[in-house]
Amino acid sequence: MRLYSTEDADSVLTTIGLDERRTQTFRAIQLLERLGQTEKVLVSSIADEWAHSLPARLLPKVEGDAYAQAFSDLVRTEALALVHKEATGDTCQRFFAQDLPLSAEERFQELFGMQQKWVKEDLVNYLKAVPGDLANMLLKFTRSTHVGTGGETVYTRR
């Protein structure tokens, strides 16, 4: 229970409540674990299932039924799945960072074996558990290019 809760202690009473983010992440992991490693599913369909699996008070604060963006942001930030933009709609594919090797070299091999190009935000989320300096790892194992007018940085295998 403590893994998915927060404690609020005042001088008289201790209150324990579910942590919104941890519970949302837990439910996302449960749904993604049912997918095969190579199976892709529409973000909108899995996001609806995810939203229905959460208690009403723990639903993300979104307008209407726009849970797809909240789910997409969650799985990308927590390094649980890859989100692909496709003509038929965004899809996600299970890819847990916790299943990757801790060695930087091996992790980069797995990452670039799964996807050829990475935006910095997504790549950094998958490298949080790797010991060492992030900037040095990126210099050693990747090539960076700036794409588009916004200058978004994309990383490829060195």
Image (spheres, grey):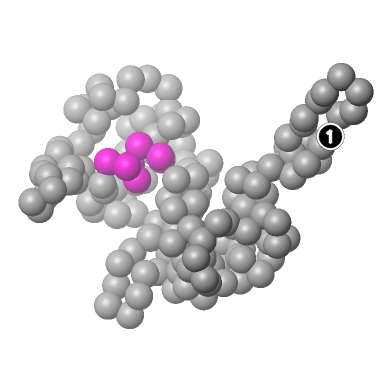
Q: Quadrant of the C terminus?
A: top left
Residue 44 placed where, x, y %? 47, 73
Q: Residues within 10 Å of mark 1 (few under 14, many from 20)?
A: few
Q: Is residue 38 visible?
A: no
- Residue at the extreme left: 149
Indicate whether residue 44 is drawn in magenta.
no
- Residue at the extreme right: 12
Q: Secondary structure at mark 1?
A: strand
Question: Does 102 sit above or below residue 148?
Answer: above
Q: Is residue 124 left or right of 18 when viewed as pictured?
A: left
Q: Is residue 95 left or right of 143 when viewed as pictured?
A: right
Residue 16 placed where, x, y %? 81, 37
The amino acid marked with disc number 1 is Thr
The image quadrant of residue 114 is: bottom left
Q: How many marks?
A: 1
Question: Does 121 sit above or below residue 32?
Answer: above
In this view of the protein, which residue sits in the foreground, 90 or 18? 18
Dominant SS in magenta = helix
The residue that mark 1 highlights is: 15
The image quadrant of residue 131 is: top left
Residue drawn where x is 48% and y is 58% of the image: 70
In this view of the protein, which residue sits in the foreground, 26 or 93? 26
Indicate whether residue 122 is drawn in magenta.
yes
Residue 155 placed where, x, y %? 20, 43
Residue drawn where x is 57% and y is 56% of the image: 60
Residue 1 placed where, x, y %? 81, 40
Residue drawn where x is 33% and y is 80% of the image: 88
Q: Is residue 118 left or right of 21 when viewed as pictured?
A: left
In this view of the protein, which residue sits in the foreground, 67 or 116? 67
Residue drawn where x is 29% and y is 54% of the image: 115
Bounds of the magenta segment:
120-126
Q: Is residue 68 visible?
A: yes
